[in-house]
Amino acid sequence: MSKAEKRRLVPLEIAGIVLGILWLIPFYLMLTNAFKTPDGIFESVMALPGTFVWQNFVTAFQELDFLKSLFNSVMITGVSIAVIIIFSSMAAYALARNPSRLSTTLLFVFVAAMLIPFQSVMIPLTSIFGQLNMMNGAGLIFMYLGFSSSLAIFLYHGALKSIPKSMDEAAIIDGANRFQMFWFVIFPLLKPITVTVAILNVIFIWNDYLLPSLVLGEANATIPLKMFYFFGQYTTQWHLALAGLVLAVLPVIIFYFIAQKQIIEGVSEGAVK
């Protein structure tokens, strides 16, 4: 890279640094004030805590019933992601490998479903699920499957069109049945799209408040829903509210650092494909 090109990149680097600092400021405020006393927060919001009050996190952990809320969020998110990937990949395979007017129409229906806002179906959806006695975790997972499958099928369908049918035929000639051919030959080739689908839906489902608030009660609340109740109780006690918020975002940060290699590789491979 020449010196002239490097000089042209300097403004972009400076802008990136400034944006990075602006992005980190809310996390700085959340973390530093979570360790302060109430008086310490109102004395100086930006200053580092003079004394680190760990009791804030102990109280928030107990009041949030954090382990139960974490278990509910992990179960609902994990099962929902698995169900979405399994059913969406199989549906997309059936549509991609059986081209016809019907399959094309069904694909358009799935794509069109992405344009329907949740608010327009919120009341009839909860009414129907209430009549079916499915206002629980299982019903919530079923709802997530319905709302997330359209985009997932669209992404899988696009990827499957780039995989030649000769691979299916070769697997069948080698003695594999349809189930084995899809899961052991085709599905591994869809890893970049699977990672992309998983990332998009983990972010959506883990952070979702509206659907759990309609379906789940406080006893089975996920972390975002539990945080709503927690903030309502400790609105004036910001040291406890911010400590609870740190506990709520910590699992997502840990998940990202553990899986960042797979996430970056999946997104990069999906972009190249």
Image (spheres, grey):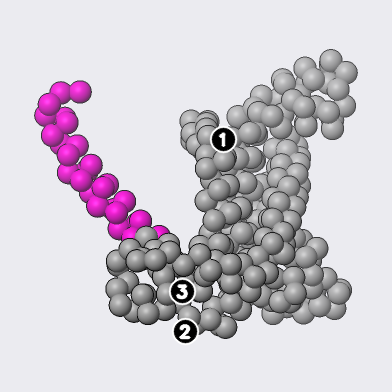
Question: Residue sitting at 60 percent across and 29 percent down?
Answer: 162
Q: Residue at x 58, y 70 (%)?
A: 60
Query: In 3D space, how far apart are the residues under numbered discs 3 and 1 (Cα atoms)?
Result: 36 Å
Tell me which label, 1 or 2, sits earlier in the chain.
2
For the residue pair 3 and 42, the one nearer the viewer reads as: 42
Residue picked out by circle 3: 239
Instruction: Please rate how many residues cluster around mark 3, counting C-alpha atoms within 10 Å: few if below 14, some from 14 to 19, many from 20.
Output: many
User: Measured from the top left, where is residue 185 in percent x and y?
Assistant: 74, 25
Q: Nearer the viewer, residue 52 or 265?
A: 52
Which residue: 37% across, 60% down?
28
**Badges 3 and 1: C-beta atoms under 8 Å apart?**
no
Q: Quadrant of residue 36?
A: bottom left
Amino acid found under the numbered disc labelled 3: His
Task: Name the residue that disc number 2 marks.
Answer: 236
Residue 92, placed above or below residue 189? below
> Residue, x 43% and y 64% (percent of image)?
52
How far apart, in angstroms, are the residues tagged by discs 1 and 2? 41 Å
Look at the image and tell me whether residue 225 can be seen.
Answer: no
Mark 1 lies on residue: 262
Image quadrant where one finds the N terminus:
top left
Q: What element does badge 1 sit on? A: helix
The earlier-in-sequence mark between 3 and 1 is: 3
Amino acid type indicated by mark 1: Gln
- Identified by mark 2, the residue type is Thr
Task: Specify whether residue 3 is painted magenta.
Answer: yes
Horizontal and vertical percent for residue 12? 22, 43
